[in-house]
Every structure is written in C-alpha cells, then in structure tokens.
Image (spheres, helix red, strand yellow):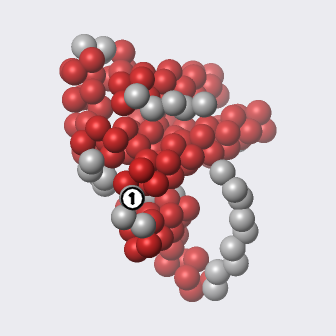
Amino acid sequence: MILMTIYLPEVVMKLLNNVASELNMQPEEIVSELILEKFSGDPNKKIEMYLELYKKYMEDADKLIKQGDFLQASEKIWGAAASIVKAVALKKIGKRLASHGELREFVIRVANETKDDEIRLLWKDALSMHTNFYENWAPPEDVVKAFESVKKFAEKLAKYAGIKLK
C-alpha cells in the first residue's frame, strides 16, 4: 500500500467523516470505492483494495496495541475483519456487502459451506471489537485475543476464496 497525505478542505473532511460514520466505513474506504467505481470497472481492483485495507488495519491495530491504545485498536480490528469479508464476498459472489447484516449473512454462508463453525466464533470476536469501540468495555487482553482471532478468521476466509493474504 502506498501512503499519501491528501489535504482536504475542512468542510469536505467533516462531510467525509459524517458519511463514513453513517455508513460504518472508514474514510479511506469511501474515497477508494468512489474512485474505483467511477474510473475502473474491474472488480479485481476492488478486491485488491479490500485486501490492502485488511492489511493496513491489521498493521494499525498491532501498532495501537503496542502503544496501549486498545480502544482505537478495537476499531481497526473490526475494520480489518469487515474488509476481508468484503473482499471474499466480491470474489465469491460478485457483490459488495454494505451492511452489518449482509456481512453477517455472508459469514454464516461461508461457515455453512465450509462446515467450519469456528468461523462464526471468530466473527463474533471481531464484531465485539466494533461494539467495544463505542462502549469501551473490553479489557486489553480481550482486544489482543480478538486481534489474533481476526488473523485466523482472515486466513480461513482467504483459503475459502482462494486468495493469498501475504
């Protein structure tokens, strides 16, 4: 992933952050999707985008855990899990998943198809991190365990879709 700093007018940043919050997305995901939708019809580029976001969020979460910022790490862990689900869904069913319900339904589908109930449990760990970001109830060891759970979750989903994570 190439990192670039883009300066946006305050009015645009406020709007972007509001939209991101409403859609339960990260600002970089919104901007990336808009550009890919407008200028590229290649679904593989969107899959690549979600895989890169998964990796970035996991790297960010790891750094935040090491810094002791477990609240922010929680949201990055959730973002990583959601990103891998979105990548796999695009690869397997050609559909962009937009809501928590769609993400959950797809995860259940994968668990059923693979007959791997651990996928459901790992997903619940990821989902708990999204809740923790808003409620700040999880102790640090739960955040660390969820980080490891999401790694395992991503590996299982990537294998299911025939995607390489590394």
Looking at the figure, which quarter contains the C terminus? top right
Residue 77 sits in quarter? top right
Q: Nearer the viewer, residue 30 or 122?
A: 30
Position in image of residue 53 (x %, y %): 55, 48
Q: Secondary structure at mark 1?
A: loop
Left or right of residue 116, residue 54 in this image:
right
The residue at the point 36 percent across, 30 percent down is 161
The residue at the point 71 percent across, 40 percent down is 64
Position in image of residue 1 (x %, y %): 66, 51
Residue that extends furthest to the right in the rendered view of this protein: 67
Would residue 133 be seen by someone viewing this image from the given angle? no
User: Within 10 angstroms of label 1, few (less than 14), some, or many (20 or more) residues?
Assistant: few
Q: Nearer the viewer, residue 92 or 131?
A: 92
Question: In the picture shown, does residue 4 fall above or below 89?
Answer: below
Would residue 65 be seen by someone viewing this image from the given angle? yes
Position in image of residue 90 (x %, y %): 33, 46
Residue 70 sits in quarter? top right
Left or right of residue 89, residue 74 in this image:
right
Question: In the picture shown, does residue 91 fall above or below 22?
Answer: above
Position in image of residue 75 (x %, y %): 54, 45
Task: Identify which amino acid the numbered label 1 is placed on.
Answer: Asp
The residue at the point 38 percent across, 45 percent down is 86
The residue that label 1 is drawn on is: 42
Left or right of residue 144, residue 15 in this image:
left
